[in-house]
Structures are given as structure tokens and as C-alpha cells.
Image (tube, helix red, strand yellow):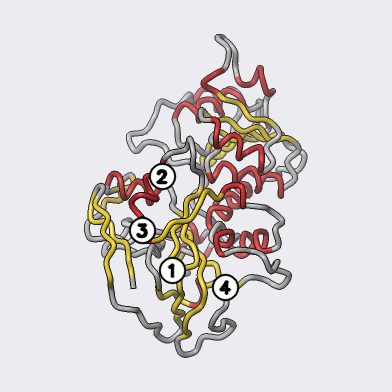
Amino acid sequence: MLECQVHGAQDLRVRDVPMPRPGPGEVLVRLGAAGICGSDMHYYFHGRVGQFVIREPLTPGHEASGVVAALGDGVQGLSEGQPIAVNPSRPCGRCPACREGRENLCSQMRFLGSASVFPHMQGIFREYFVMPASQCVPLPAGALTDISLGEIAMSEPLSVALHSANRAGPLMGRRVLITGSGTIGCMMVMAARLAGAAHITVTDVVDHPLSVARQVGADQTVRTDQLPAGATLAGLVGEPDVAFEVSGAPAALSTCLETVRRGGVIVQVGTLPAEGMHLMANQIMARELDLRGSFRFGNVFEQAVAAIARRRVDVRPVLSGQHPLTQAAQAITLARDKTQSMKVQLIAG
């Protein structure tokens, strides 16, 4: 079977490796679709994501769907040939964060396709992989028969957005600003709409992702690099109640702080540069703003799978295309080009 490994910056190798076998409590999964995330791009182009540096060959990938190929001893509730979504999180269940119900902050988290630990936690850019049965989430009752494995693989990015929406507090009837209209930005549109947001504005500096944001439900989109001289975003769109900073750009976080209403909430979802940024802290003090972080996702993965499987949200406009594992390097390069791509996925075939 084929497996992708990143050995360093722009050094990706597709290898033929032995087929794994599931042990007790484990499931052998044949890859259905695997989304290329920003972290996968960083590992490929830079050999690192922030402080997480590749120290041994790393198989990236953590957004996946698949089909059950074989069951290990003792596995119940799953059957061969069954489509599943893969939850990439494996918290310890014992640390203070886990005991508080905040497993995404687990101090011993094992997250697929990550160099945050050593030996690295290998990911799912491979034809077959073994998963604990607890991380294999079947489609719920009521799932539509035409749901594709590509759609189901979007459960992880939707989970990120659902968790971020929860971090913001009630969104029913609120005006929402989302800075950044990439995959997570579009997922945030869907999550905010599910939570009852009354009006959603999305900003970016590229036309293509903004057009997709409109397709998935944004009420208003704005090219912030094309504002008239002297104009402010608040003057154009009004002051939102809640802002989600998704782009990871320091200027976008500053825009959120300047634009949200007094007493408003800003949720930082995107990863800012490791060297930090200048923060207008007096804005937070004088206008009593709440600045909150949102990291990966909490206990919302099954909710995301159900929302996609029943098409309470339609992720299809975000899907740009699928490519075989043998073209992984080209696919990652294509995924980085936001003028033409949104979510690019790898498939086994």
C-alpha cells in the first residue's frame, strides 16, 4: 500500500509499505478522502508548524473519511464496508483539562499527523490505516444515501467551527464578522448560521474564497484591501456583536478589535505568527471586549458528522477536487493557491 511521508521542507516521498493489521479494539480503514489542511501545507513547505518541527519522517493528514476494511478483536458497533469519519483527537481522559470536559486542551493529546510529540503522531495520507474503534464515527441514522466520502471528511474542519461558535457564546440573532474566507472561514459561516446568527459578514483579500463564502450562506462579503481611502470596515458593515478571526493575519485581528461593538466578543481561531504581534490592549480595556481563543475542537465531532450526513450544512461548494496519493506534492501546492482552490483532498485511488 502507498503512504506519503514528509522528510523535511519540500521533501515528500510516496512509499510502498506493508499493509497494517488491526489489533484488539482497532479498525483497519481504507482511505475514502483526506483533506489537505493548513498544517499539512506548513509541514510540507517549511518542515514545521510553529514550534512543532519534523524530527523524523512524518505522514501528514488528520481530516479523513474511510471505509471499514477489517475489525480487530472485540470491536462492536462497526462492520466491514461501513463508511466512517475519523476523529483525529486522542485525549488521555485523565488530566485536569480532560476531567473538566475540555479534552481539546489535554496535556497528553495525541493528534493525527502532528509533530507536536516525539515519536511523531503519524497521520492518514495513506491507503490504509489502523484506528482505535473509538475514533471511527459511523454515519448516524437518517444520513442521506448520496453523501460522499469527500463530504464526510469535512467533519473535522466543521468541528473546529462548531467549537469556535460555542466559545463565542449565544449567536442567536447576533451580527457576526468572520475575517478570512478559506475552508475554516466558510465552515464558520455554516456554524454561525446553525447557531442562529442573524447576519454574517465575511472579509478576505482574495475574490475566489469570498465567492464560496457567499455560496455557503454569507450575507455580505468585503475585500478589505479595497476599502476606499479613510474608510473603516465598521463604517461599511456596522459593528458586529461577535467577530471570528480565522485568517491568522495580525492585521485581521486588529480589524476585529476595531470593528466589533463595545462589549463585543472576538474569538481567535486562526494561528498567528509564532513571533507574536502588537496588540491594541487598550481597545480591550476601554471598550470591555472579550478576546477568546479557540483551539481545535471539543466534544462536537459527532454533531459535525450528523450535520454533514443529513446535509443540515452543505459543504460541497468548499470542495475543490480530489487527487491520488501519488500526486500529493502537487495537490498540496494546488491547495495553497487560494485564487483557485479551497479544500483539496487526497484519495487512495
Residue at x-position 50% and y-position 52%: 321
Q: Amino acid at mark 4?
A: Pro
N-terminal of the pair, mark 2 or mark 3, is 3
Query: For the residues carrying marks 4 and 3, which lies nearer the camera in this image?
Result: 4
Q: Give the quadrant of residue 349.
A: bottom left
Q: Position of residue 325 (x, y in %)?
A: 38, 61
Q: Nearer the viewer, residue 253 or 48?
A: 48
Seen in the image, is 128 located left or right of residue 304? left
Label 2: few (<14), some or many (≥20) within 10 Å?
some
Q: Which residue is mark 4?
A: 83
Under circle 2, the secondary element is: helix
Q: Amino acid at mark 2?
A: Leu
Q: Amino acid at mark 1?
A: Cys
Task: Report the Cα–Cα distance between label 4 and label 2.
Answer: 27 Å
Q: Which residue is mark 3?
A: 60
Q: Is residue 108 visible?
A: no
Asked if residue 163 is positioned above or below residue 152 in the image, the reply reads above
Answer whether labels 2 and 3 touch (C-beta < 8 Å): no
Task: Report the Cα–Cα distance between label 1 and label 3.
Answer: 21 Å
Q: Position of residue 76 (x, y in %)?
A: 56, 86
Asked if residue 339 is positioned above or below residue 27 in the image, the reply reads above
Task: Report the Cα–Cα distance between label 2 and label 3.
Answer: 16 Å
Asked if residue 156 is positioned above or below residue 67 in the image, the reply reads above
Q: Amino acid at mark 3?
A: Pro
Q: Which residue is mark 2?
A: 334
Q: Nearer the viewer, residue 260 or 186?
A: 186
Q: Which residue is mark 1?
A: 92
Answer whether labels 2 and 1 touch (C-beta < 8 Å): no
Q: Position of residue 103 (x, y in %)?
A: 50, 61
Query: For the residues carrying marks 2 and 3, which lies nearer the camera in this image?
Result: 2
